Image (cartoon, grey):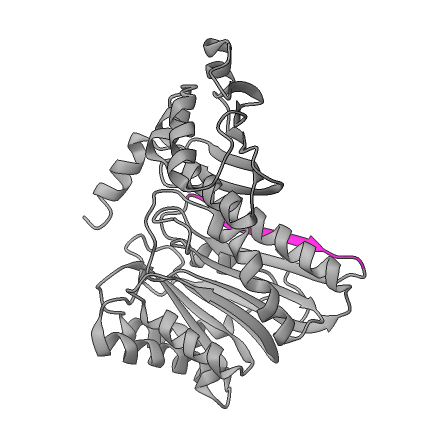
Amino acid sequence: MKLPQGFKAAGIKAGLKPSGKLDLGLIYSDLPLAWAFMGTTNQLKAACVSRNRSRFSSGDPVHGIVVNAGNANCANGDQGIWDNEDFASLAVNALSLPRVQSMLTASTGVVGRKLDMEKLKTAVPQLVKELELDTDHFAEAVVTTDTCTKQVTKTLRGGARIVGVCKGSGMIHPNMATMLAFVMTDAIVSQEKLREIWPDIVNHSFNQVTVDGDTSPNDMAFVFSSRQARVLEEDFIQGLTEVAQELAQKIARDGEGATKLLTVNVSGARNDEEARKAAREVVRSPLVKSAVHGNDPNWGRILVAVGYSGAVSDMANLKIDLQTRTVYHGKPQDFDAAEISQSLKVNDAVIDIDLAAGTAAATAWGCDLSAEYVHINADYTT
């Protein structure tokens, strides 16, 4: 996928993944990049998350980010912190940048294993030599248990472009997920504006995804701008939101062991927070996810999840539609269970819920829960 103006990217094999697949990536710009960032809320944080948060607080622009997959470099004590700093330094030196602070880092993979710095010392200079004008090798290099790469592109009026790349398949839950997301744009937008709008966009995209209820210590979402092409602010915000939401859906669709994307639309909430919370709880519920996997129109599980979400609803008028068929509206409705079960035998399952308590709405994305999910995670390190 072609990159926006001012960006280059690369992905190579460093030998960090036992599979021997691409596992080292780089996004780079000769130009100082405006950027915004959101990271995990897990109290356990990988060294890269803490370092990036420090860089974010400084307010300084950056020139890019270097990423490794196959090793989280998390829970490694001081050694992990030093290795992460050396990881950034390797990229800075290979790119002949003046300051180590101008390069961010990201890691994803198994927790508690030390980075193989000898392999990185050899690989990072080669990585810089492979920089190109598209994202394909980078997107391949950052995945772990993903079954496919995840990329989205959008062109705005006037020609400005937004390109997003992310990884994520398991340990996915709001605030945030075991995902890394990298969104690049050449739209002229200030760093202050990026940092103003990015949290809300993340909250309505990446923070509305759940696969298994676990929150990773490494998850981060970035947006970078090379500030080359003029754009209307409202067009940019809409385009950035659409790219983030499409990436979020790709993560949900590729959930570990998933066979279908589950979309939960909530309307009629008192406020945005309650709408988002109700949607997340339904899409997170293992019982709802199992029922969707088995094509079972068990609406009671959906109603229970709405109830414990804490969102206020008018239970006498609350309405649940499953695959557009109304199954509950203040009381059980007559419906053809076999027909709805058959309608669930597709790649996309949709639940619509009207809380009948207000005008706010939100959407959350997830996937079904299959036996394959257990197999993948039971054998993850062995």
Q: Is residue 53 above or below residue 154?
A: below
Q: In the picture provided, is 19 more to the left or to the right than 265?
A: left
**Does the segment drawn in magenta span residue 230?**
no
Can you say which quadrant of the picture contains the N terminus? bottom right
- Residue 149 locus on image (x, y percent): 49, 49
Residue 14 in the image: x percent, y percent? 36, 65
Q: Which residue occupies the foreground of this view, 212 or 258?
A: 212
Q: Quadrant of residue 73?
A: bottom left
Give whichever of 211, 165 is nearer the camera. Answer: 211
Tell me: residue 105, above or below residue 244.
below
Q: Residue at x 55, y 51 (%)?
A: 204
Boundaries of the magenta span? 147-157
Report the residue at 33% width, 76% height from top.
Answer: 84
Q: Is residue 281 left or right of residue 199?
A: left
Residue 59's x, y, as percent? 53, 81
Q: Is residue 7 visible?
A: no
Q: Is residue 156 above or below residue 287?
A: below
